[in-house]
Image (spheres, rainbow, N blue to C red):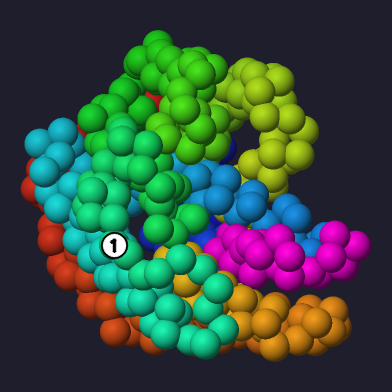
Amino acid sequence: MKIKGGKFEIPKQIHSVELLRGIASAMVCYFHLAKGNINFLPDQSVIKKTASIGWSGVEIFFVISGFVIPFAMFQKKYTIRNFITFLQKRIIRIEPPYLISILLVVFLNFVSTLSPYYRGSPFHIDWPNLLGHIAYLNVFTGGKWLNDVYWSLAIEFQYYLLIAVSFTLIVSGKMYWRFLFIILFLLSSFIPFPPNSFVFTYAGYFIAGILLFQLVCNIIGFVEFFISIGLFIWLFVYQQGLFLTGITLITMLVILFVNRVPAFLRYIGLISYSLYLIHVPVGGRIINISEVKTTNIVLRELMVFVAFLICILAASVFYRLFEKRFKTFSSSIKYDQTSPNYQAG
């Protein structure tokens, strides 16, 4: 990103976001393939060891959303009068692929029971639990997610609701309103909510993205940014530790300074949501079949990469058949064109 006259030139498109989405989805995919089946690889396996930090791809996604959602709202001149339109766009963009992936999980669960190598329980649909996936109600019922990644989608959707109602505070021309939102949101992360249930637990990641958005869009200046980020780092290291603080700061730096993204990584970023949705039901089954077919550790390690490539292929198909259509439909919905006046304090 370019700085001119002490301010950022607001870009229309940020390619580093696609890079980070691709990296984050690949990290989570690799983590689940190498470590999802605890009996597949021994603990001393290099593949299993290198996959150990892959779970942090979820936190990278949270930082990305913290930045890119208000950034898109700012570009489209969002105001609270566009609340319903915003929800329509988000729901159409993310919910149909999510619901279709649930059907895929149920179908593959059934097909798996037909295999002579199947060793699990008979096929059964827990209807209350299945219906609890709609609108992410399992967050409140404590129901088990059919796919290990679904919990994070519930967190993301809560963030969409929060940002939609508080956007005026984030872009306020008054510093005290901006600080009030940041401080209250950050302090909410210390409330002992149930794990993997509510956005407040992960507030720090979203705040990092929000602060970066405010800086890039010149809502705040460098002084306010560094004061805010200093407070953030101090509390975040205490709460989340050095590793996750480092991951968060690196993600912010990549958004700011990486401008060129290789075509392959850009493509992985394009299909990242599809990959995120289906890598467990697709890749996980390849791993489970491999566990039955071979005990050779080298072959099993090789199958992690085979499964990874198959997941990329399956995600590409899923994207073209489903996600792309709803993404285009969502983009066709426009906000009220009334132009708000965003000014820094």
Residue in view at x 28 percent, y 27 percent: 166
Residue in view at x 44 percent, y 59 percent: 147
Q: Quadrant of residue 321?
A: bottom left
Q: Residue furthest right?
A: 44
Q: Is residue 84 left or right of residue 268?
A: left
Q: In this rendered view, identify the residue nearer to me: 236 or 281.
A: 281
| Helix, strand or loop at mark 1 | loop
Residue 139 location (% of width, % of height): 35, 38
Residue in view at x 68 percent, y 57 percent: 54
Quadrant containing the N terminus in the rendered view? bottom right
Residue bearing the label numbered 1: 125
Residue 177's place in the image compared with 51, above or below, is: above
Residue in view at x 80 percent, y 82 percent: 295
Is there any visible trace of residue 3 in the rendered image? no
Q: Is residue 318 left or right of residue 263?
A: left
Is there any visible trace of residue 40 in the rendered image? yes
Residue 52 location (% of width, % of height): 75, 55
The verdict on residue 184 being magenta is no
Q: In this rendered view, identify the residue nearer to me: 146 or 161.
A: 146
The amino acid type found where label 1 is placed reads Ile
Q: In this rendered view, identify the residue nearer to me: 302 or 210.
A: 302
Please tell me how crowded label 1 is: few (under 14), some (14-19), or many (20+) other residues with Cα within 10 Å: few
Residue 138 location (% of width, % of height): 32, 42
Residue extent of the magenta highlight: 24-47
